[in-house]
Structure formats: structure tokens, C-alpha cells
Image (cartoon, rainbow, N blue to C red):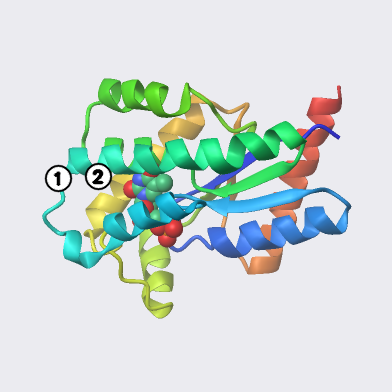
Amino acid sequence: MKGFFLSLEGIEGTGKSTQARLLADYLRSRGYAVIQTAEPGGTPISLKIRELLLSVDSREMDVVTELLLYNAARVQHIKEVITPALTRGDIVISDRFSDSTLAYQGYGRGIDRQVIDALDAVATGCMRPDITLLLDVDVEIGLRRNREMQKHDRLEREDVTFHQRVRRGFHEIAAAEPERICIIPCFDGIEDVHEAIKEAVASFLRERER
Ligand code: TMP
């Protein structure tokens, strides 16, 4: 089977990492070769950039520096991990990709859309996942889940209105690209969300076979 590129997106506390792992395990159990990865990260250089981005010591970081660093991490990630895996015919599951930049740095920080798109064209060549699952939950619920998991990085410390703008951003991005982006409500338990994700992937594969 030809591989494909799937991204999981969403605000804080939707359970993306857990769902990425469950989906990767499920697809592997069906015999597929799967690379599970995450942004910012996936390579040694990108992980160093991640540390810089998420450290609470980086409180002086300008929003443009932040935007450039997310893109820089993505360049390495595509070059070292995503493109080689897709070339081999593997399935790539990435916890976040460029929709996060538009949602967080665009809608959240208020950076102009044209600037975001121009940098995205440089960093990714306008590469897009074949399918994106937008995991959706209320901001208050997501932030509470993260507090319970003791996650306190620099972006999670932003106030509720920042995260509300990010969530609205994700919804607008999804509305603009309904063929690629499927919204998965995450108010139920982990198993229910996993079932909904499996159904979305099965439907994507059926569509692709046509
Ligand atoms: P996470 O791995 O816990 O999702 O943390 C990554 C954080 O970085 C999260 O707060 C979302 C943020 N982020 C951006 O602001 N822009 C981006 O382009 C990406 C990939 C992540």
C-alpha cells in the first residue's frame, strides 16, 4: 500500500499524543509500517529548538522569533523524517504540523496570515498532510486536563482567551478544508475517541481506493 501523511491537531489537553500512539499501534497490528512523530520535534535539531520554544525561561521571546523557530524545526522534521518515510511508502502520523502554526501564531498571536503563509511556503513548499484529524474539546476542559498532567510549558501558561482564539482558528482552518480535515469531538473517553479516529481513517482509505 502507498503510504500517507496524517496529522493530529488541536488545542492543549485533547489527548493527541495518546491517540497518536493508539492509532500507530492499531495500524501496525494491521501490518502497516508506521512512523509516529511530533512537532516541534522528531529530530535532534528540532528537539533542541523545541526546548528553546517551550522553556518558561524563554519569556522574552518575540512572536516572530517564535514563528521562525517553529518553521525551522519543521524544515528539519520534513527533511530527516517525513519525506524519507513517505518515500519508503510508510504511514507518517505526526502530532501537529503547519495547521498549528496558523492556529497559534496566526490566530493566537495575531501574526498576519500572509506572513504565516509565505514562511510556510519556504519551510514546507506548501506540503500538506493527506488527512488531518482535528481533536476538539472546550478550552477549559483541555487546560484542566493539562494541569492535572502537570504540563506547564510557556504556551500553556497563556490565558484562556489566547487558547480560545487558537481553538476558533482551528475551526476556521477546518471549515476551509473539509476534504482534508476531519473534526473529532473529544468529550468522551479515550476508547470512544480512538473508535472515531479509526472510522475517519477507514473512510479516508476507502475514498483513496476509489
Ligand atoms: P505539545 O507537544 O504539548 O503539543 O506542545 C507543543 C506546543 O507548541 C503547543 O503549545 C502548541 C505549540 N505550537 C505552536 O505554537 N506552533 C506550532 O507550529 C506548533 C507545531 C506547536
User: In the image, residue 78 lies at what x, y percent?
Assistant: 53, 37
For label 1, the SS is loop
Q: Position of residue 68 (x, y in %)?
A: 28, 37
- Nearer to me, 43 or 26: 43
In the picture shown, does residue 180 fall above or below 42? above
For disc 2, the neighbor class at 10 Å (few under 14, some 14 to 19, many from 20) is some
| 120 and 11: which is toward the camera | 120
At x 65%, y 37%, the residue is: 84
Residue wearing tag 2: 66
Q: Position of residue 175 (x, y in %)?
A: 49, 29
Confirm or deny contact between disc 2 and disc 1 (CB under 8 A). Answer: yes
Rendered residue at 85%/59% (across/down): 29
Please name the amino acid that badge 1 sits on. Answer: Asp
Corner quadrant of residue 200:
top right
Q: The C terminus lies in which quarter of the figure?
A: top right
- Dot 2 falls on a residue whose secondary structure is helix
